[in-house]
C-alpha cells in the first residue's frame, strides 16, 4: 500500500477526571490498554492505544484528567494531558453527560483554549441521563468553546462509539503508518503489568491512599518456551502506616490484590503468570525524578 493511500494521526482524549477517557480508549481500540477505576485521577501516564480503520491508523492518546493541581505529581499529570493535546492532530474533548458543564469541565475548556487543534465534543455516559438533557448540554458546551462536531456515546455500553470511530479516519493527515498493523499499544508488558496491579490497588483501597502509592515492575522473566512469566513488583508507599494498610491483616489485602492482578494479567498476556508483590516505604517517592521517569512523566522542577 503506497504512502499516499494511507493516513495516520494522533487523537488525544482530554477531559476532567473520571469522565471515561480510559474506558472510551479501551472501547475504540477493542481491548484493554489503559486501566479503569471508579476513582478520579487513575490515569497518571500518557497511554497510546492504536487501531486501524480502513487505510487509516488511529493512534489514541489517553491522558490524565485535567484539574486544578496542587502537588508536584498532580502538576506533572496535568502537564502531560495538555502536552498530549498539543502534540496530537485531533482532540476529543469528553464531557460527562450526567455532570454536565460543571466547574471541572469549564476548567478543561479554559485550558484547551490555548491548544490550537481540531476539536470534537464527545458527550459520554449518555446511558445515565434522559435524552432531553443532551441538546441543551451540546448548546451549552459549544457556547463556551467551538467544536467541529459533536458525538453522543456511552463508552460503557458501546452506544455511539461506532459512529465516533467512523468519523475519525478522514480527519487525520495522509502519511505512512507509524506502528505495525497488529500493535495495540506503546506500553511494554512490564509497564502494563505495573498498571494492572495499580488498578487493583485502586479498586481495593479507599479514600486517599491509592494516590500515595506507585507500583514498579522490578523483574519480568519469561520462560524459554513462553508458557509462563515471573513478575516481581514493588508497591511504594510514603509512610509505614500506609504499608500496614496495603498489606492488610495477616497480609490478606496484598494477597487479594495480587490474586486479582495475576488473573487479569494471565488473560491479557495469554500465559501463566507468577506474580510476587513487595511493599516498601519510600517517603519521598513523589519528589523523586526517577519515579516520574518510570511513570512516563516529566518531573516539575518546583515542588
Image (spheres, helix red, strand yellow):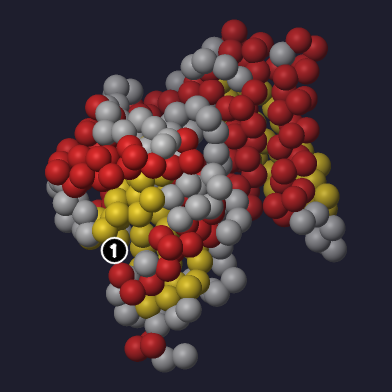
Mark yes or no: residue 51 visible.
Answer: yes
Q: Is residue 120 left or right of residue 165?
A: left
At horizontal 48% and vertical 23% (from top left) the residue drawn is 211
Q: Residue at x 64, y 23 (%)?
A: 204
Q: Position of residue 220 (x, y in %)?
A: 70, 48
> Image height check: is 16 above or below 202?
below
Q: Point out residue 253 in the picture as x, y percentages from the top left corner.
A: 72, 19
Q: Does 151 sit above or below residue 282?
A: below
Q: Is residue 118 above or below residue 70?
A: below
Relative depth, front residue between 284 and 137:
137
In what element is the residue under mark 1?
Answer: loop
Please identify the quarter of the rendering in which residue 188 is found. Answer: bottom right
Q: Quadrant of the C terminus?
A: top left
| Left or right: where 146 falls relative to 12 | left
In the image, what residue occupies the spot 76% across and 26% down? 256
Q: Which residue bears the numbered disc 1? A: 89
Q: Residues within 10 Å of mark 1 (few under 14, many from 20)?
A: many
The picture places residue 244, in percent across and down from the top left corner, at 66, 11
Q: Is residue 215 left or right of residue 93?
A: right
Q: Nearer the viewer, residue 303 or 250?
A: 250
Side (left or right) of 220 relative to 159: right
Question: Which picture quadrant has residue 117?
Answer: bottom left
Image coords of residue 37 (percent x, y): 55, 33
Amino acid at each position: 500500500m503506497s504512502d499516499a493511500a494511507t493516513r495516520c494521526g494522533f487523537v488525544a482524549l482530554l477531559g476532567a477526571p473520571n469522565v471515561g477517557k480510559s474506558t472510551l480508549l479501551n472501547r475504540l481500540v477493542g481491548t484493554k490498554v489503559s486501566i479503569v477505576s471508579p476513582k478520579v485521577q487513575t490515569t497518571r501516564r500518557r497511554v497510546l492505544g492504536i487501531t486501524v480503520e480502513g487505510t487509516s491508523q488511529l493512534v489514541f492518546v489517553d491522558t490524565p484528567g485535567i484539574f486544578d493541581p496542587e502537588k508536584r505529581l498532580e502538576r506533572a499529570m496535568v502537564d502531560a494531558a495538555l502536552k498530549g493535546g498539543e502534540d496530537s492532530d485531533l482532540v476529543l474533548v469528553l464531557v460527562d453527560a450526567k455532570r454536565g458543564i460543571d466547574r471541572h469541565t469549564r476548567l478543561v475548556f479554559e485550558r484547551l483554549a490555548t491548544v490550537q487543534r481540531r476539536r470534537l465534543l464527545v458527550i459520554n455516559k449518555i446511558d445515565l441521563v434522559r435524552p432531553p438533557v443532551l441538546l441543551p448540554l451540546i448548546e451549552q458546551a459549544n457556547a463556551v468553546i467551538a467544536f467541529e462536531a459533536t458525538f453522543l456515546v456511552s463508552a460503557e455500553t458501546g452506544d455511539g462509539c461506532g459512529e465516533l470511530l467512523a468519523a475519525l479516519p478522514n480527519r487525520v493527515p495522509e502519511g505512512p503508518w507509524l506502528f505495525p498493523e497488529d500493535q495495540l499499544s506503546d506500553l511494554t508488558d512490564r509497564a502494563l503489568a505495573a498498571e494492572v496491579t495499580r488498578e487493583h490497588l485502586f479498586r481495593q483501597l479507599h479514600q486517599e491512599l491509592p494516590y500515595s502509592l506507585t507500583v514498579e515492575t522490578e523483574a519480568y522473566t519469561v520462560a524459554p518456551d513462553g508458557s509462563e512469566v515471573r513478575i516481581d513488583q514493588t508497591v511504594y508507599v510514603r509512610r509505614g502506616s500506609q504499608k500496614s494498610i496495603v498489606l492488610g491483616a495477616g497480609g490478606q489485602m496484598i494477597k487479594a490484590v495480587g490474586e486479582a492482578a495475576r488473573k487479569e494479567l494471565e488473560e491479557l498476556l495469554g500465559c501463566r503468570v507468577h506474580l510476587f508483590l513487595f511493599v516498601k516505604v519510600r517517603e519521598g517517592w513523589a519528589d523523586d525524578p526517577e519515579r516520574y521517569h518510570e511513570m512516563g512523566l516529566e518531573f516539575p522542577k518546583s515542588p
